[in-house]
Amino acid sequence: MLLRNASCQHNFHALFGVTSCPHGDTLDDAFSKLNPQEVQEVVSKAIETLIRRKVLYACRLLDTYFVVAIDGTGTLSFPKRHCPYCLTRTCQGQTLYYHNVLEAKLVTPQGFAFSLMTEFIENRDEKATKQDCELKAFYRLAQRLKKRFPRLPILLTLDGLFANGPTFDICETYGWKFMIVLKDSHLAYINEEFASLSPLQSDNRLFRRVGRKGEVKQAFQWVEDISYLDSQGKEHTLSAVQCLETKTDREGVEKTTKFKWVTNCRVKHNNVCCLADYGGRIRWKIENEGFNVQKTGGYGLEHAYTNNPTSAKVFYLLLQLAHMLAQLLEKGSLLKAACPDGLGSGKNLAFRLLEAWRNTTLTATTIEATLTSRAQIRFYADTS
């Protein structure tokens, strides 16, 4: 229907000089001949452009750091081997072949989750005795990220898997800050130091109420200058931060949730709330606004667009680019002005765009006016 629609054919020709989009098999064949790293550069360059043009300056933590969340997710799974690089998992005699990625996404309080760089987790080393994993991928990704963005002030927000000496060392070497989830079962020495010293440091506390009516109570405690010796004999100076958040659930019962992080930031009264909310807890945006939207919001992250391993990487990277453009459109002031009542969801926005493409004929005058006109676009904060 799309290819036979007269308006679509006209619009394709007006914008791209062709009458229709290529067939999926044609894309698969073309993508199999590309270098995924060159496609990765297109994605990274797009985010770099937003940074250089100061579009994201208001999103910086403490007016300095761009918050980058790093986490892994599954993309494809098969009952039979998909390619020589598949990861494998056997359960009850059944072997699953699958592919994962490790993502570095720039996350913001406005709700953006932009893919900055992707590391594919795959069994490339034939001599390896263990499978590739998130930790191994992180060490590769960190090196690439530093090389591509050597002067970008970064604060990494990570889950407890990365709370280890090598991660601390990488961040110190690269000049990065970090907020890493500190579980009670991890880094026993740091947890013991926090438990011993926090009752003695009454100045390192802060209490506040948040929420529309101040219904949420937060109690912060922190301990600085903890000397931690890792398994490699390297010493790190760290801080531990804890937030106890108490609020009433729908049944009227008060419940307290504990959040805890290890960090190399200097923690003070004037920054502990910002570090916790927009350095630590904002990590969830890579799951919610990132992976979950791409899996359930119509992008088809887990759909096998191809069986070719190179094409699969290209499709994945182009999906990241498409999601970035959709986020900029969805949260931009131009859409808000055109649709003040909103569209309901990202899927509705996609359907509206498709119907506009199918039913509106673009003229040369319209295209020229759009390309030459200037407009200031502002982005609205996520209030969810």
Image: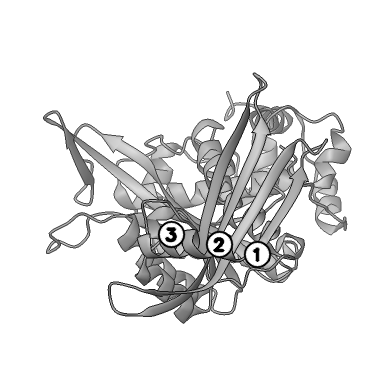
Residue 25 in the image, given as x and y percentages of width and height: 38, 39
Describe the element under mark 1 as helix, strand or loop: loop
The extreme top residue here reads: 251
Pointers 3 and 2 in contact (C-beta within 8 Å): no
**Quarter of the image that includes the N terminus:** top right
Q: Are marks 3 and 1 in contact (CB under 8 Å)?
A: no
**Residue 42 visible, this orientation:** no
Label 2: which secondary element: helix
> In whole angstroms, how far apart are the C-alphas of marks 1 and 2?
8 Å
* Picture residue at 86% right of the left edge, 52% below the top: 369
In the image, 170 versus 128, the foreground residue is 170
Which residue is the site of mark 1? 204
User: Mark 3 falls on what kind of element?
Assistant: helix
Can residue 371 be seen here? The reply is yes
Marks 3 and 1, how far apart at CA = 16 Å
The answer to whether residue 283 is left or right of residue 35 is right
Under mark 1, the amino acid is Asn
Amino acid at dot 3? Asn
Judging depth in this view, the residue of 352 and 259 nearest the camera is: 259
**Relative vertical location of residue 28 with respect to residue 342 in this rendering, above or below:** below
Residue tagged 2: 198
Q: Are marks 1 and 2 in contact (CB under 8 Å)?
A: yes
Q: Tally the numbered discs.
A: 3
- Residue 222 versus residue 357 in the image, above or below: below
Question: Label 3: which residue?
Answer: 191
Three-letter amino acid code at the position of disc 2: Ser
Q: Earlier in the sequence, mark 3 or mark 1?
A: 3
Q: Is residue 92 left or right of residue 194?
A: left
